[in-house]
Amino acid sequence: MSQDNLMKLKSASGTILYSRKNKKKLAGHKIELKKFDKKLRKRVTFKEVKK
């Protein structure tokens, strides 16, 4: 993945995922996504953090 569109997502359990972000549409917005956390074995909210 190209590094300029890459964002880091972190859950409450400390699990980290990487995803892409459209910089033109979502400039200045923090992203929150519901994803599956392997540690907790359920869907939780992942929030965008600094790289």
Image (tube, rainbow, N blue to C red):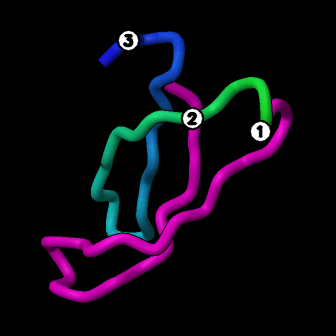
Reply yes or no: does residue 49 show up in magenta.
Answer: yes
36 lies left or right of 2? left
Residues in magenta?
A: 27-51
Nearest the viewer among 21 and 11 is 21
SS state under label 2 = loop
Q: Are marks 2 and 1 in contact (CB under 8 Å)?
A: yes
Amino acid type, callout 3: Ser
Marks 2 and 3, Cα distance to the nearest angstrom? 11 Å
Q: Going 28% across and 57% down the picture, which residue do you hit?
A: 15
- Circle 2 packing at 10 Å, graded few (<14), some (14-19), many (20+), is some
Marks 3 and 1, Cα distance to the nearest angstrom? 17 Å
Residue where numbered disc 2 is placed: 21
Q: Position of residue 51 (x, y in %)?
A: 49, 25
First along the sequence among labels 3 and 1: 3
Reply yes or no: does residue 40 show up in magenta.
Answer: yes
First along the sequence among labels 2 and 3: 3
